[in-house]
């Protein structure tokens, strides 16, 4: 998984478990794209303090994922729902004449799409 994508997902799932100060620094660095120096000036702490906080945040977010596994479950469920959508679409394309099967597959596909949109 791409490192930026992974950090984004981890923060989306577990960011609220960080302290307010950690969240602020993490967001300034990763979301607002400020440098360590800019953050240190804005937060009135040393550049090293910003760096250490970011490292602690990354470690905390990874530890939360190791314990809870929510990001992994999310990715597995999303991949499974995409596979269901793909399979139902393929079957629908192959069996256009069977109305009962077509209606059932449309219902399954509609559920899968609804879940995918919520993920």
Image (cartoon, rainbow, N blue to C red):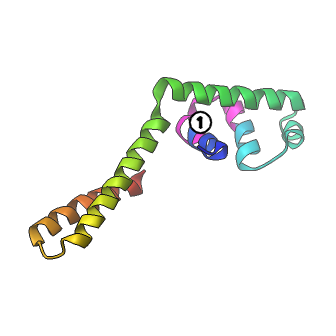
- Picture coordinates of residue 76, whole percent (x, y): 41, 42
Q: Estimate the x, y position of residue 111 in percent, counting from the top left.
A: 27, 57
16 falls in the magenta region: yes
Q: Going 47% across and 36% down the picture, which residue do you hit?
A: 72
Q: Main secondary structure of the magenta part?
A: helix
Residue at the extreme bottom: 97
Q: Which residue is mark 1?
A: 15
Res 23 visible: yes
Where residue 66 appears, as percent x and y from the top left, is 52, 25
Q: Residue at x 49, y 38 (%)?
A: 71
Can you say which quadrant of the picture contains the N terminus? top right
Toward the viewer: 62 or 21? 62
> Could you say where residue 91 lies in the image, as x and y percent from the top left?
24, 65
Q: Which portion, as a residue range, is magenta?
A: 11-23
Whether residue 45 appears in this view of the structure is: no
In-front residue for pair 95/4: 95
Q: Quadrant of residue 17?
A: top right
- Tag count in the figure? 1
Locate residue 68 relative to residue 103 in the image: left or right. right
Image: 4 above or below 63: below
User: Seen in the image, is 83 located left or right of residue 31?
Assistant: left
Tell me which corner region of the image, top left, top right, bottom left or bottom right, holds residue 64. top right
Q: Residues within 10 Å of mark 1 (few under 14, many from 20)?
A: many
């Amino acid at each position: 998984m791409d490192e930026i994508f992974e950090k984004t997902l981890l923060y989306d799932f577990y960011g609220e478990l960080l302290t307010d100060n950690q969240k602020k620094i993490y967001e300034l660095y990763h979301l607002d794209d400020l440098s360590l120096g800019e953050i240190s000036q804005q937060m009135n702490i040393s550049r090293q303090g910003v760096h250490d906080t970011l490292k602690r945040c990354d470690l905390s977010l990874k530890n939360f994922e190791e314990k809870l596994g929510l990001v992994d479950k999310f990715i597995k469920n999303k991949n499974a729902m995409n596979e269901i959508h793909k399979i139902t679409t393929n079957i629908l394309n192959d069996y256009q004449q069977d109305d009962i099967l077509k209606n059932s597959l449309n219902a399954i596909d509609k559920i899968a799409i609804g879940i995918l949109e919520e993920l």
